[in-house]
């Protein structure tokens, strides 16, 4: 019996739900699901320019596990680009650094500080928000 997977720490969820290729008629192809932890690995390694050891410590996984997550994310991105497929972000096996919320009206992702007494969107003040599960 394999041991239980450790949750991967994600500082913030992606600011998008997905991407669609422009100028293609490949609407019948299924979307590629990019997990939150794969997005975080790409962001840390390629955007924040961290080495794998630093990034793995931040995500609370081993360096080898980080390398596997990063490789999976790179392969999915390459497949989406070459096959002109849509990319969708999905929760996966992650835990958020803080309690995050999603506004269903303006699609903003934000945290609500403990001192705040309202449950409204930080951008549009809508009450149509949902919690992004930890």
Image (tube, rainbow, N blue to C red):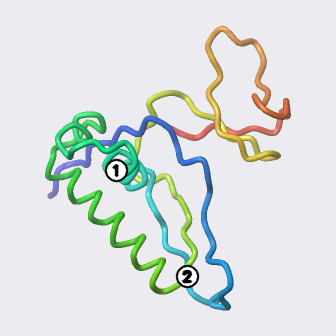
43 lies left or right of 19: left
Q: Which residue is mark 1?
A: 41
Q: Position of residue 31 (x, y in %)?
A: 55, 76
Foreground: 21 or 11? 21
Q: Which residue is mark 2?
A: 30
Foreground: 93 or 27? 27
Q: Position of residue 78 (x, y in %)?
A: 39, 75
104 lies left or right of 69: right
Q: Position of residue 54 (x, y in %)?
A: 22, 37
Disc 2 or 1, which lies upstream in sequence? 2
What's the distance in space between the residues labelled 2 and 1, CA to CA? 23 Å
Quadrant of res 111: top right
Looking at the image, residue 28 lies above or below residue 106:
below
For image coordinates 43% across by 53% down, the residue present is 39
Helix, strand or loop at disc 2?
A: loop
Q: Position of residue 121 (x, y in %)?
A: 77, 31
Quadrant of res 11: top left
For image coordinates 58% across by 75% down, the residue present is 86
Looking at the image, residue 116 lies above or below residue 9:
above
Quadrant of res 75: bottom left
Position of the N terminus, as image quadrant, is bottom left
In this rendering, the label closer to the viewer, 2 or 1: 1
């Amino acid at each position: 019996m394999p041991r239980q997977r450790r949750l991967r720490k994600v500082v913030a969820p992606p600011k998008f739900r997905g991407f669609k290729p422009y100028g293609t008629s490949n609407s019948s192809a299924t979307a590629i699901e990019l997990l939150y932890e794969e997005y975080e690995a790409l962001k840390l390694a390629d955007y924040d320019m961290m080495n794998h050891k630093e990034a793995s410590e931040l995500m609370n996984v081993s360096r080898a596990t980080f390398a596997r997550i990063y490789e999976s994310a790179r392969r999915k991105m390459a497949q989406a680009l070459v096959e002109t497929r849509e990319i969708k972000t999905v929760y996966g096996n992650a835990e958020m650094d803080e309690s995050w919320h999603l506004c269903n009206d303006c699609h903003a992702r934000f945290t609500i500080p403990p001192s705040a007494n309202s449950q409204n969107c930080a951008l549009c003040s809508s009450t149509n928000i949902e919690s992004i599960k930890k």
